[in-house]
Image (spheres, rainbow, N blue to C red):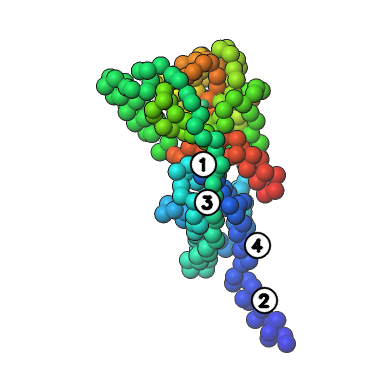
Amino acid sequence: MKIILLLLLFFSNLFSLVDITLSHKNIKPGSTFAVILQSDKKLIQAPNVIFKNKTYQMFTILGSIKKYEVFLPVDYHAKQQKENVQVRYIENKKIIKKNISIKIVDGKYKQNEIIKVAKGKVTLSSKNKDRTKKEYAAVYKNVYSYINPKDYIGKSAFILPMKSKVTSDFGNARIYNGKTKSYHSGTDFRAKVGTMIYSANDGKVALVMDRFYLGKVVYVDHGRGAYTYYCHMDSFKVKDGQVVKKGDILGTSGKTGRITGPHLHYALRLYNTTVDPLQYASLHNKIIKIYH
Ligand SMILES: [Zn+2]
């Protein structure tokens, strides 16, 4: 009996109990899900997740060595099918792999939202084509390709960038000037020119820029691959590299870029994938309540 107990004790010390939780069983394209790993011991190393052929490093929750998380984007154009989420980590010098499935389901997004904008903003002149290419390259280099391992938003819940009515949801299928098909890559808030825009959470201003489609835009890096950005602005109140707190004024809303009228287009990129900013925020707020 004593030997069995000793053996049990030996093995329970050798292997830890690892619990892996997915925030969703079913997920819409253009949304975010979270993977949480909790271990009862300190033996877990280098946890990461493989999803749709991409490897994502998991990050410690508030510096704990027993709790890890990662927020993963599902592309708007992702096929509706079952996908495998593989969690890998090292335990006692062995690589452990665990598979969990997630189902990508119909986003039920509104169809045929008709948008009328200036002709030159749909059929681009070669000069403007050149401009949009250069802009994207600059944003990719300075923003989207950089995964800041720092966690700016640990326990901090997201707020809305302004208190106003949502006039167009993320994901609406759009037709520009009767021909160009696209989808709405953010959430629109009703805002007359000059309305204050607030940073939705803590972070660092990654880039302040004037873009062809998005107009005057501020990108805020929240760490770990998540950037919120605020478009069609009229004026800026922040500079590149500035650290901001949730609720700080980033500038005022306007009607710059490709617009039908003045409003705020609020968007979020996660690992260079556009996702619903409000769904991301509500998931983050839920996760921090439970695990942080
Ligand atoms: Zn918009």
Residue at image coords 51%, 41%: 30
Residue 102 image offset from top left, x and y in percent? 55, 56
Instruction: Return the mark for residue 104.
Output: 3
Q: Earlier in the sequence, mark 2 or mark 3?
A: 2
Amino acid type assigned to the residue bearing label 1 in the image: Gly
Q: Which residue is mark 2?
A: 9
In the image, residue 250 sits, relative to residue 17, either above or below, namely: above
Q: Are marks 4 and 1 in contact (CB under 8 Å)?
A: no
Residue positioned most to the left: 126
Give amino acid for label 3: Ile
CB contact under 8 Å: marks 1 and 2: no
Q: Which mark is residue 30?
A: 1
Q: Alpha-carbon distance for marks 4 and 1? A: 34 Å
Q: Residue at x 57, y 28 (%)?
A: 168
> Which is in the foreground here, disc 4 or disc 3?
3
Q: Which residue is mark 4?
A: 40
- How far apart are the alpha carbons under marks 1 and 2? 46 Å
Give the amino acid type for the residue marked by disc 4 in the picture. Answer: Asp
**243 relative to 260, above or below:** below
Considering only vertical position in the picture, is 204 above or below 69?
Answer: above
Q: Residues within 10 Å of mark 4 (few under 14, many from 20)?
A: some
* Marks 4 and 1, the one that precedes in the sequence: 1
Residue 125 percent across, percent down from the top left: 29, 20
